[in-house]
Amino acid sequence: MSPPLPASTTAATTTALATGAATSLLSLTTPFVAPPDCDSLFSTTSIVSSFVWNNYTVTTIGITVSDPTNLRFADCQPAGWGAVVPESRFFFSPAVCPSGWTAYNVAAFTETQRSTSTTVTYASYSTVNTAYCCASDYRLNDMPFTVSLANVASNMCVQQMGVTIETLKDQYSFSAPASVRVHSPYHIAWNAADRRTLSPTPPDILTCSAELATWVPGASVPPLVCSDGEHSSPGRSAGLNFLFIGVPIILVGAALVCCSKNELEERGSRKRLRWKTTDGQTRGKVISQGSRALYPRANSTTWRGEWGVASQAGPAGSSIVSYLTRMMLLECLEEH
């Protein structure tokens, strides 16, 4: 059996629920535990026909919603709940989730506007940690179709029941629950100073631009991926490694590719010459080509387009390979 559930966030319709005037929020320093019979306070509010796009199929699904009109409803909420103005009854600060519930969308948040008619602040905090709490077997906003319910807030805790998978004649498959149950979440908040007064201790992510999609109260908090300098994170370390190691490798590789391409283009544009000599007087003759000095290699009486790179006075004892490499890099830098 699921833990006891709250009801809708809308203004109550019973006399007992309509008299609330307090504007301060209730605090829940320990997990609230409702009486065991509170999970039966549901009523069927509407039947929704959901259209499955591109298949012209209509599925009728029943929706049951926690019932705020039930006279026992206030007894299933924390003490003092009915004294709070209706717009603020599902906001608690400082607070933790009720017993057995799961926190969703845990994040640092700043907000003052709660409805079109009432402005609510979290105990004068400007920025706080916030989360939505849903009962066991419920998930935040897990509605399988778009629906607007009069007695439910925009954020809702949803339990899909009797889910089946149907396959149409064109082999398109879709899942459809036989019915769904909905209750409004508890919206809780706390700041760093509140953590020592709350049990179980909630996470503090005010100084970290991170968000926990889900968190079971009392469970260990996984490492947070932050974007500021006060917290370390795997993402930040990976970024630094790429900056100091990956980027230089990429730049050097790009330079080598660029220079190699230029060298190949230059070689392809050269006019291959063939000549013979018997007296050796042309050996070592420097022939200018552009801004570079070329000389025929004198390793044979026949040269077949083999060229070396040298200064006007020849290699001067330096390595042809190392000299060629330097010249290639210099040429690439000059061109770019």
Image (spheres, rainbow, N blue to C red):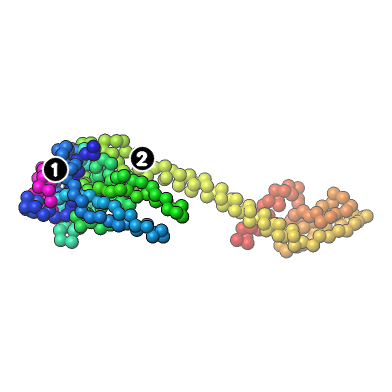
Disc with the residue nearer the chain's start (2 vs 1): 1
214 left or right of 260? left
Q: Is residue 321 left or right of residue 66?
A: right
Instruction: Identify the image quadrant of the N terminus.
Output: top left
- Is 154 situated above or below 231? below
Residue 196, visible in the rendered structure: no
Give the residue pinned by disc 2: 223
Q: Amino acid at mark 2?
A: Pro
Stretch of the chain drawn in magenta: 69-86
For label 2, the SS is: loop
331 or 250: nearer the viewer: 250
Type of residue at label 1?
Cys
* Residue 306 at x, y percent in the picture: 80, 54
Residue 325's x, y, as percent? 68, 51
Is 273 contained in the magenta span?
Answer: no
Tell me the residue that label 1 is attached to.
Answer: 76
Residue at x-position 28% and y-position 39%:
216
Horizontal and vertical percent position of residue 22: 9, 51
